[in-house]
Amino acid sequence: MGDIALPSGYKRVDGRDSAFARWLRRVPLKADAAVYLYNGQPKRYQGAQYAVLDVPVGNKDLQQCADAVMRLRAEFFYDRKMYDRIWFTDNNGKKYSCPPGADRPRFEKYLEQVYAWCGTLSLEKQLKKVAAFKDIQPGDVLIKGGSPGHAVLVMDVAVNSSGEKIYLLAQSYMPAQSIHILKNPMDESLSPWYKAGDELNIKTPEWDFTQQQLKRW
């Protein structure tokens, strides 16, 4: 993922959660940039993605938008064997924790349970609001809870000498599909990077967010 080129004059920043930022940059990209659904069929709309992450989708219609965000956060801690840090809550505040020392099949089964009981509404409650959008960090989440709701993950952030920030976003969607880096429909010359400016609305290919919807673990 770190192979995605930067615009001239920018350099990547790790932010506060530097270990997660570096891990996200190491997530590999697939050679095939097409997005596929959980059933192996190509997604009808292929205009949203710049690249596709080499991350499991599963063969059930479960790993959708918030689920993809939770998958990447859980994979980060799983790789580090920090099982006690892998937990998510449902809408009622019930906590779902990863079994200590879980092997890969057990980990995948645990994630399916999370996907079944947790979603945009519960994840929005679990995350903390970011006071200022210009403080955007790798690993942050743009999220609108509800039905419908949506969530995308800030995969990378870079800054130039003037302090201007740009960032990358990744999503899954409905039905469950490949996690992919989003194009920037607001600025094709900057795409897939987005500028963290004064705009109140962030328009992505399949959802619009506001700056107030930026949250953090």
Image: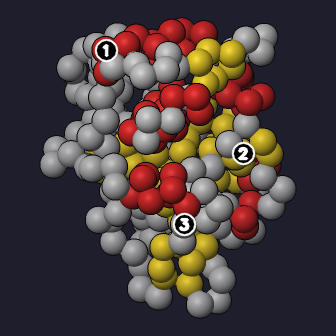
Task: Looking at the image, tell me whether mark 3 or mark 1 is earlier in sequence order.
Answer: 3
Q: Name the residue under label 2.
A: 215
Question: Which quadrant does the C terminus fall into?
Answer: top right
Q: Separation of disc 3 and disc 1 at Cα?
A: 31 Å
x and y percentages locating residue 26 in the rendered image: 34, 55
At mark 1, the secondary structure is helix
Q: In the image, what residue type sits under mark 2?
A: Lys
Type of amino acid under label 1: Pro
Nearer the observer, disc 3 or disc 2? Answer: 3
Q: Position of residue 107 (x, y in %)?
A: 40, 19
Which residue is nearer to you in this view: 61 or 104? 104
Q: In this view, does 177 lie above or below 191?
A: above
SS class, disc 3: loop
- The vertical placement of 136 against 182, above or below, is below
Q: Residue at x 29, y 65 (%)?
A: 3
Q: On the image, numbered disc 3 is attached to which residue?
A: 14
Separation (CA) of disc 2 from disc 1: 30 Å
Q: Mark 2 or 1, which is nearer the eye?
A: 1
- Residue at the disc numbered 1: 105
Q: Give x and y (percent) for residue 188.
A: 43, 65
